[in-house]
Amino acid sequence: MGPMIFRRIVIGFITLWVVSVIVFFGLSILPGDAAAIQLGQAATEESLAALRAQLGLDRPAYIRYFTWLGGMATGDMGISNAGGATIASLIDFRLIKTLELGGIVAVISVPLSIFLGLAAAMYPGTWLDRILTFGTMSLVAVPEFLIATFLVLIFAVKLQWMPSIAYMSGGESLWEWLHALAMPILTLVIVVSAQMIRMTRAGILNVMNSPYIEMAILKGVARKRIILRHALFNAIGPIINVIALNLAYLVSGVVIVETIFAYSGLAKLMIDGVQTRDFPLVQACAMIFCGTYVLLLLTADIGAILSNPRLRKPK
Amino acid sequence: MALLEVDNLKIQAMKDDGTPVPIVKGVSFEIKAGEVVALIGESGSGKTTISLASLAYTKPGLEFSGGEVRLHGEDLLTMDPLKQRDMRGQRVAYLAQSAAATFNPAITIGEQVTESAVLHGILSQEEATKRAEELYVALELPDPDRLGGRYPHQVSGGQLQRLMAAMALVGKPDLLVLDEPTTALDVTTQIEVLKAFKKVIREQGSAAIYVTHDLAVVAQVADHIVVLYSGEVQEQGPVDQIINHPTHDYTRRLMAAVRPTPTAGMGDDTEHGHGRSEAAIAARGITAGYGGIVDGEPAVTILRDINVEVERGDVVGVIGESGCGKSTLARVMAGLLPSARGEIVLGGKTLAPALKDRDRDELRKVQFVFQMADTALNPRQYIGDILGRPVEFYLGLTGQEKRKRVAELLDMVELPIAFAERFPMELSGGQKQRINLARALAGNPEVLLCDEVTSALDSIVGANVIKLLTALRNKTGVSFVFISHDLSTVGSFADKIVVLYAGRVVEQGPTDQVLSPPYHPYTRLLITSVPELRIGWLEDTMQTREAAAGIARGVEITAVGCPFFNRCPIAIPGTCQLEVPPVRLHGDGHQIACHHTLDEVEESEAGPQQILHGYEKPIMDDDAAKKP
């Protein structure tokens, strides 16, 4: 088991390194450089050259790459091309915001999804199962901006219970803070739960046809215990993976939801960076997103290994 | 009053259009306390369905449509579902056919064994664990204190099968339901499990329903037999009456399908009139296994130094227990698993070890027939396409010619041409296996590698497939490598037998010679382990020294010495486990790998059951000199 987990970790690092190459050189082949953008119309050849030298843009690409990679590895993400602030300071605040939103959504949606998925699997074919199956299938098919728009129409415009944007000035009480965030939280919980419920239900039902489940029935084990003790542990691998993918989405994929609710998280910062051609910022954000994915999928893989006795305890 | 009364039981299935199809048509029988009743019949006779009814359970898609199943006078079928749940595992316990599939891979053995008794509140967890450990001892399972903490994949198949008995017995049920509990096992393992079941049933005083298609097994364990066909009772009575004086035709037919004890002369001895000069395919000094290869030694060695020749038009049977390397040998010949050492020679030409380095004509000449036709045939392709693809690939035929060849192939395996337009799922198990054979024959191969092709089939269907193989051999002159764990089938069909044990050839030669003395001690163990249709056979066999020495011991794959050492009744301590046994020749191509001379082996087989210790190490070539 040890070597298997070690291999996953090594593969994780290799993935991150490949991503770093793609992110760095992919952005360098885009037209226009930071010096030209900063100086704008007023640029002369001399001033451009001077600024490029100052920003280090005149050095060969591979040297810039290794300097950048070294910086990323040690937490020094460089200086923003646009404003001259350190990227760390730009990201710091936004990352916390994103993690706050994602964290709350995860804390609500993961237990909720597993509970509802198990409930649907426990009573297949009942009205509860039908409603959940139909509802989640519809929600998986609807894009998130549509869900967000509908929620705004219902709760903010019609009922006027919630604010339509998630604006915070700082210094709110916990209640005010939750009230302000309610709409994006609700949207994201719906979006990520639908998939996780479906996967939990499908994973459990898939295992329910196994001979060992029939054996448990013939031993007189109650259905609840069959699902929770006999089926869940055999179905957990794929469920963990779907949870990990959805959590990764909460960090990196929420740009549309952040935009709709004017919530200033990390994904929105990256989009802003693209618009101002602030390459170091975009690179740093991309690396954080990829790092999140790699970390969560690695956790899922290790979780799947640990939950499988055949891998955990070889002969 | 009987313990269990099955009274006019009816069970039906529902077709898609809602019309009911009767599966069990009014079956009645009863079981007294402490009695073992066998339900016998072919697949489709409803025996498993009836046995499950004693737990008030039906497989999905089936339903009870009439009759009663009374336990202590109380009808189980109309009982409250909560009471049914309480009855299951506590008053009636079930043992399934495949323990490997029936144990939950994610839960420890101890928890699964004790679960039912603890849930029903019969025993506390400590009491249940203690009782489980007593049962492990009674069932002769190794390491009883630590067994409960293990996971199912950490113990062997035969041990799992006995653990399932422990799981059923832990709650002291009144009735045990055993559904083909030894059918999937090797003969030597089967004896050990049968013995354990019989002993435990006697000691615990529970009654049992024993479901099987194997009359020879029934004769060993049952008090009373119910013969079923198509959901109806044909005949029932005490075991002695049914086995020795059957009155019903169907019972007699079942008796006829019992596999004979393998003996010399059981095969068809026709001369095939083909040239015996050159081997069609030969394995020379093959060592193979899995994992990285260092200096010709794989990380996990499965086969060691195998020399086997298959002459043109011959059938070579490869037998041995599961895990002995039979399938690996076929995979090496086919190139699916490149060997670490040695070579495969096809018609005098050495083949590349790996499939990808062989040319198309070489591929065409060696074809593989897999055990499970269900998984070997693409379920989304028409039979015509399944057969047409190799015809096109190997013979380059298209259009009308291809269709003609496909029709020819279907005719060869005795199926109607209309089958070309069907999907595999529309065919029965035996028909699918025929298609599987036709696919292998499509390119006019020279060698067919058949891996347990009849093992998943009913005995009567399997016998028909063997008949077909014999006809095909005579018609096409193809050579067969026929892999099976069933010595009777191999003995009735093969010209030559290769006995594999722990990845080595321990004996090989013409069928009649392998099946007559002198035997390698392992071959002898295999032959004596095939159940006979005789009451009391099990007890007799358990008293032989082969059983005493060889049964209930694990197979050890070793690099040095004779691998059979730890199960051999005539092993020479100090020699056998250290030195590779010499290959002794006996007559025409009959080889036995043993440290004893063949005279010593034969003497030990004939004489009193005495273990021969302290022999001097035999001289390698004295034997060949003595035998003309």
Image (cartoon, coloured by chain):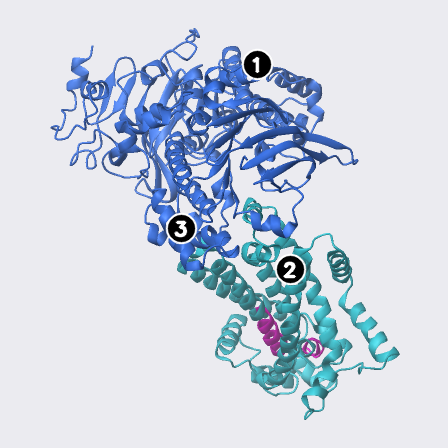
In front: mark 2 or mark 1? 1
Q: In this structure image, what is the colour of chain A? A: cyan
Disc 2: CA contacts within 10 A as few (<14), some (14-19) or many (>=20): many
Q: Say if labels 3 and 1 share a chain.
A: yes
Count of picture labels: 3
**Magenta part of the protein: which range?**
A271-290
Q: Which chain is blue?
A: B
Q: Quadrant of residue A23?
A: bottom right
How far apart in space, not on screen, are marks 3 and 1 (Cα)? 44 Å
Res B106 visible = no
Chain of the residue under the numbered disc 2 shown in the image: A
Secondary structure state at the residue bearing disc 2: helix
Chain of the residue under the numbered disc 1 shown in the image: B
User: Mark 3 is on which residue type?
Assistant: Ala
- Residue B132 is labelled as 3
Chain of the residue under the numbered disc 3 shown in the image: B
Q: Furthest residue to the right?
A: A158
User: Mark 1 is on which residue type?
Assistant: Asp
Q: Furthest residue to the bottom?
A: A171
- The residue at the point 77 percent across, 65 percent down is A143
User: Mark 2 is on which residue type?
Assistant: Leu
Q: Position of residue B387 (x, y in %)?
A: 63, 25
Q: Say if labels 2 and 1 share a chain.
A: no
- The residue at the point 46 percent across, 46 percent down is B172
- The residue at the point 56 percent across, 36 percent down is B4
Q: Position of residue A155 (x, y in %)?
A: 83, 77
How far apart in space, not on screen, are marks 3 and 2 (Cα)? 32 Å
Residue that mark 1 sits on: B249
Q: Position of residue B12 (x, y in %)?
A: 70, 34
Q: Position of residue A130 (x, y in %)?
A: 76, 56
Q: Furthest residue to the front?
A: B1
